[in-house]
Image: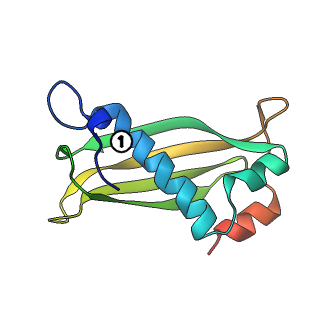
Amino acid sequence: MQVRPDDIDMYQHVHSSRYLDYVLAARFDQMERCYKVPISEFQQHGLGWFLAGTQINFKRPLGLGEYFIVRTWIEEFTRTGVRVQFQIDRKTDGKRCSDGWAEYVMVTVATGRATPIPAWVRAKYSL
């Protein structure tokens, strides 16, 4: 991915809120490309993922036009959710710019309430 002009804050580096946007974009891509389960498949089943909590550790700033690599992976499953770890590295030198985790809860969209993760989801995500 590449840092866009609208990602930059008044201090001339990526605004902290954009890092979570990068993680979400990478996660949606990974879900479809690697696990073969696009977000639309969850929607067809009336399911969704709600963000329950996150921690982002900022190591180095990213600047305008810089390319970076986002890596995400599932650290653990719970009955109704997953904990996803992530790393964001600058492409030119491989330096870690941020890392952290995000916890997502599976919900039934109609009710907005947590629901156990179906076996088919666990099987697809257990590569």
Q: In the image, is 121 to the left or to the right of 96? A: right
Which residue does the image show at 44% across and 41% down from the upper left?
A: 21
Q: Is residue 75 visible?
A: no
Q: Is residue 1 left or right of residue 74?
A: left
Residue with the most extreme top position? 10
Q: Amino acid at mark 1?
A: Tyr
Residue plotted at (37% across, 48% down): 100
Q: Is residue 68 visible?
A: yes
| The furthest residue to the bottom | 127
Q: Quadrant of the C terminus?
A: bottom right
Q: How is the image coloured?
A: rainbow
Residue 49 drawn at (x, y percent): 67, 43
- Return the residue nearer the eye: 84 or 14: 14
> Which residue is labeled 1 in the image?
19
Q: Position of residue 19 (x, y in %)?
A: 36, 42
Q: Is residue 31 left or right of residue 94?
A: right
Residue 21 to residue 67: above or below: above
Can you tell which quarter of the image residue 106 is in? Answer: top right
Tally the numbered discs: 1
Q: In the image, 13: left or right of 125?
A: left
Q: Secondary structure at mark 1?
A: helix
Instruction: Tell me the residue at 77%/55% (across/down).
Output: 41
120 in relation to 110, above or below:
below
Q: Position of residue 11 (x, y in %)?
A: 14, 28
In depth, the one of 106 and 69 nearer the eye is: 69
Q: Residues within 10 Å of mark 1 (few under 14, many from 20)?
A: many
**Residue depicted at x 63% and y 69%:** 35
The quadrant the N terminus occupies is bottom left
